C-alpha cells in the first residue's frame, strides 16, 4: 500500500536546522513503513526540490498543493509529531475519503498484522475495489475455494459497492448457491464454471442446483433472473412463506430445519430481524456458520429489534452446543482498525477487516443485546456496529 506520512515540517520550526530535524523524523518513519513492505509518501520530499528550483517564494504555491494532491493516491495515512495545520489538512482528506489514518507506527503495525496468521481455507486476499474502478483488473466475481466442496464468491466493489459474498456448497446429491449477488455481474456463468469443474472431477453431469438466499434484500437476489429456466435448477423465491415451504420449517422462527445436500446435511436456522425471511446456515462438515447480514464485520442493520434479539440468542445457543469455527457473513464494511467502518457506498477498501468472525464475537453481541432488551441502541464494537432502524 501507499502510505502518506503526515507531520510537522515548517510548523513550529523557524530555522532551517529545526525544519531538517522535523523532516528527519518523517523520513525515519518512512524507512519503517518501507520495511513493512509498503510505499511511504512524504509530500515535503516531493515539494522541496521543486521549491529549490522555483525559488523560496514558491513555498506556498507548491508545498501544500503537492502534498494534498498526493493524498488522493495514498491508501492510508500515518499522522505523527506535534501540531501542524498542513498535516491536519492531509488527515482530513483521508477521513473524508473514508481511508484509514493511524496515529503511531505501533497502531499501523498491529492493523497490518491482522489476517497474517494463515487460516486454513481463508488464507485469501479478497478483491476490495479500486481507487479508480475504470482501471481495475479485478474480475466481477472472485471465486475462492474454501475446500474442494465449498466455494466463496465475492462480488467486485467496482460492479456494486455492496460487494456481497456468495456461497456455493456441494453435496453428493445437489449443490446449494446461497445468494445471487447485487446485480451487474454474470453470476450464472461464473457459478456454472465452478459446477462444471466440480462435475468433471467427480465424473458427474446434471447435478441439481438449488438457488436460495440468506434473505431477500436486493443485493442478495439481483442475479436470480439469470437462473430462471436453467435446467436442473430450483430457485427458492425470497419471502418467509416460500422459504418455510421449500425447506420444511415447522415452528418458524424457533425451530431449525435440515437441508441435506447428500452426505452433507445443513442446519438452517431462522434468523429474522434484519429482514423477516433471513436464515443462517450451519455446515457441520466445515463448521462454518453462514450468517448473512445478521452477523458480519460491518453495519448490522436491524429492522425488527425484538426479532433480531431472539435470533442472536438462537445463534448463540446453537454456537454454545456446536463446534462453530467461523461466522461468515455477506459483507465486509469494517476496516482493520478497531471500531472504524468505511464510509457507506465506498468502492475501495484497501485495509478491510477479515471476513470471518468468531464465536467470541457473537457472544459479545449476544451479551450486549441481552443487556439492551427490546430497545436496541446503536453501538460500536471493535469488529462490527449495531445499527437499529430509527423508529
Ligand atoms: Zn440485507
Image: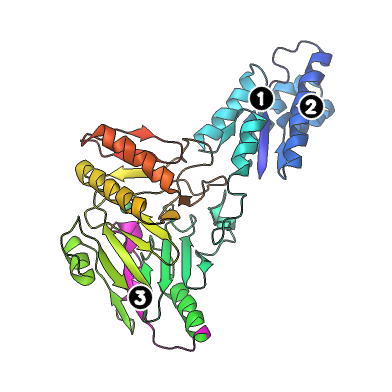
Q: Which residue corresponds to mark 2?
A: 51
Q: Residue at x 36, y 61 (%)?
A: 282
Q: Determine whether 9 is above or below 225 in the image.
A: above
Query: Is the residue marked 1 within 8 Å of ligand 1, measured from its CB?
Result: no
**Residue pointed to by mark 3:** 261
Q: Which residues are magenta?
A: 201-228
Q: Residue 56 appears at what percent x and percent y?
A: 80, 20
Residue drawn at 49 percent across, 49 percent down: 347
Are the two marked residues, 3 and 1, in contact with CB atoms closer than 8 angstroms?
A: no
Nearer to us in this view, 103 or 313: 313
Marks 2 & 3, CB-CB < 8 Å contact: no
2 or 3: mark nearer the eye: 3
Left or right, 200 with reference to 86: left
Q: Is residue 209 magenta?
A: yes
Residue 167 rendering spot, x and y as whole percentages: 42, 65
Q: Earlier in the sequence, mark 3 or mark 1?
A: 1
Name the quarter where the C terminus is drawn: top left
Drawn side of residue 133 relative to residue 48, left or right: left
For disc 1, the marked residue is 80
Amino acid at each position: 500500500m501507499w502510505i502518506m506520512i503526515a507531520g510537522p515540517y515548517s510548523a513550529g520550526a523557524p530555522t532551517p536546522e529545526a525544519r531538517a530535524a522535523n523532516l528527519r523524523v518523517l523520513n525515519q518513519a518512512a524507512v519503517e513503513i518501507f520495511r513493512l513492505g509498503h510505499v511511504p509518501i512524504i509530500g515535503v520530499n516531493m515539494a522541496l526540490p521543486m521549491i529549490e528550483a522555483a525559488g523560496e517564494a514558491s513555498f506556498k504555491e507548491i508545498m501544500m498543493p503537492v502534498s494534498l494532491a498526493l493524498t488522493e493516491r495514498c491508501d492510508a495515512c500515518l499522522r505523527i509529531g506535534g501540531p501542524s495545520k498542513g498535516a491536519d489538512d492531509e488527515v482530513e482528506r483521508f477521513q473524508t475519503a473514508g481511508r484509514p489514518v493511524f496515529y503511531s507506527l505501533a497502531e499501523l503495525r498491529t492493523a497490518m498484522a491482522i489476517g497474517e496468521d494463515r487460516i486454513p481455507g481463508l488464507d485469501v486476499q479478497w478483491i476490495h475495489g479500486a481507487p479508480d474502478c475504470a482501471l481495475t483488473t479485478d474480475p466481477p466475481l472472485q471465486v475462492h475455494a474454501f475446500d474442494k466442496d465449498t466455494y466463496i464468491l465475492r462480488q467486485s466493489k467496482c460492479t456494486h459497492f455492496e460487494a456481497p459474498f456468495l456461497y456455493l456448497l456441494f453435496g453428493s446429491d445437489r449443490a446449494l448457491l446461497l445468494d445471487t449477488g447485487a446485480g451487474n455481474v454474470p453470476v450464472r456463468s461464473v457459478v456454472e464454471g465452478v459446477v462444471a469443474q466440480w462435475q468433471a472431477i467427480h465424473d458427474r453431469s446434471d447435478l441439481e442446483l438449488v438457488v436460495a438466499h440468506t434473505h431477500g434484500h436486493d443485493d442478495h437476489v439481483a442475479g436470480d433472473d439469470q437462473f430462471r429456466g436453467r435446467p436442473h435448477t430450483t430457485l427458492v423465491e425470497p419471502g418467509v412463506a416460500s422459504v418455510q415451504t421449500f425447506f420444511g420449517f415447522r415452528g418458524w422462527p424457533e425451530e431449525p430445519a435440515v437441508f441435506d445436500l447428500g452426505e452433507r446435511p445443513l442446519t438452517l436456522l431462522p434468523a429474522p430481524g434484519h429482514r423477516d425471511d433471513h436464515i443462517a446456515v450451519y455446515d457441520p462438515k466445515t463448521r462454518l456458520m453462514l450468517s448473512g447480514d445478521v452477523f458480519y464485520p460491518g453495519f448490522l442493520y436491524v429492522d425488527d429489534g425484538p426479532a433480531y434479539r431472539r435470533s442472536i440468542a438462537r445463534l448463540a445457543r446453537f454456537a454454545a452446543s456446536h463446534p462453530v469455527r467461523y461466522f461468515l457473513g455477506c459483507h465486509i464494511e469494517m476496516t482493520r482498525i478497531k471500531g472504524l467502518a468505511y464510509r457507506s457506498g465506498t468502492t475501495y477498501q484497501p485495509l478491510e477487516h477479515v471476513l470471518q468472525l468468531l464465536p467470541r464475537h457473537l457472544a459479545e453481541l449476544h451479551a450486549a443485546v441481552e443487556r439492551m432488551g427490546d430497545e436496541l441502541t446503536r453501538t460500536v464494537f471493535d469488529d462490527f456496529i449495531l445499527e437499529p432502524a430509527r423508529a
